[in-house]
Image (cartoon, rainbow, N blue to C red):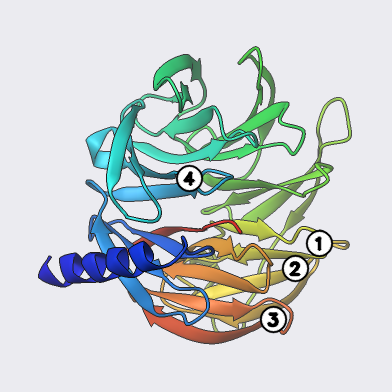
Amino acid sequence: MIRSTLLATAAALAIAATPALANNVFVSNERGNTVTVLDSTTWEVIAEFPAGNRPRGITIAPDGSELYVCASDDNLVRVFDPNTFEELHTLPSGPDPELFVLHPSGNPLYIANEDDNMVTVVDVKTRQVLAEIPVGIEPEGMAISPDARTVINTSETTNMAHFIDAESYEITHNVLVDQRPRYAEFTSDGTKLYVSAEIGGTVSVIDMTANEPPITRKITFEVPGIQPEWLQPVGVKVTADGSRVFVALGPSNRVAVIDGETDEVIKYLLVGQRVWQLGFTPDEKFLITTNGNSNDVSIIDVEREEVIKSVQVGQQPWGVVVAPD
């Protein structure tokens, strides 16, 4: 705690003397109950601050003004100033919020509450609940389409991707995927949706141009010397041009690199232990992975498709987000 306070104080003093720093990396530490802050130019840890009990999902406002953290064991969302690291206020959620997604405008926030089978919609300005949407059992993954018309939730036990109308909050489609879906990610043009299935060991590719969105492909994974049950797809990120898809493969300690046109696996990158979530820097030059069992993050050079560095962070890093320009 002393180390955390000193780091946070030093960072706050530096920020007071200079303009607000863009592109800082924020990593939620699930077991450490903190958020670690890295400078994305030097990859040095510049702060670590308390973030509630069991922080997991983490995101930031499009204008960089507020940092949102799912404090899962506190049953709420904590909101921080991303420059001073001070807690500003909290937002309501259901029990055990795990992941969330912001509307592209920055409001509202759509929260998956793992323990009550609901997605809670919250106005981040008024801090009021706008809707509670019943979904499948153990909701986790959240995504919103680039046109902001469709919100996706994945339910781990129901094994479905639920398609929710962003205005009416009605479910329009339920798509059965493989076992224990964890994450959903749209391409930037909104034509494809990728849904990872941790226990099923696949990533479903869903065609978003059809009236009834079909699964057009299931991406599978195979690494020599790695047991198939260790290849557990969780976090997914797609480059803005759609040329590459990166998939975190859990306890295999690998990130798969996929050709975004053919949806074929190109290569596997060795990262830290139990890789969980992924986050791009705004220029997409780097991809950061959170590695829960080795308590570090790996830095991937996106163009070279190579791991260039690992950095120790807090206990059991889970989520990651990078401040916008």
Task: Give the mark nearer the N terminus: 2 vs 4.
Answer: 4
Task: Give the mark nearer the N terminus: 4 vs 1.
Answer: 4
Give the labeled residue for mark 4: 65
Observer-nearest of 266 and 151? 151
Q: Are the residues flagged by discs 1 and 3 in contact, CB closer than 8 Å?
A: no
- Element type at mark 2: strand
**Residue at image point 77% right, 58% down:** 240
Observer-nearest of 57 and 200? 57
Viewer can see residue 314: no
Mark 2 crowdedness (10 Å alpha carbons): few <14, some 14-19, many ≥20: many
Which of the two marks, 3 or 2, is nearer to us in this view?
Answer: 3
Which of the two marks, 4 or 3, is nearer to us in this view?
Answer: 4
User: What's the amino acid at mark 3?
Assistant: Glu
User: What's the amino acid at mark 4?
Assistant: Ser
State the mark number for residue 18: none
User: What's the amino acid at mark 1?
Assistant: Asp
User: What's the amino acid at mark 2?
Assistant: Ile
Q: Are the residues flagged by discs 4 and 3 in contact, CB closer than 8 Å?
A: no
- Element type at mark 4: loop
Q: Are the residues flagged by discs 2 and 1 in contact, CB closer than 8 Å?
A: yes
Which of the two marks, 1 or 3, is nearer to us in this view?
Answer: 3
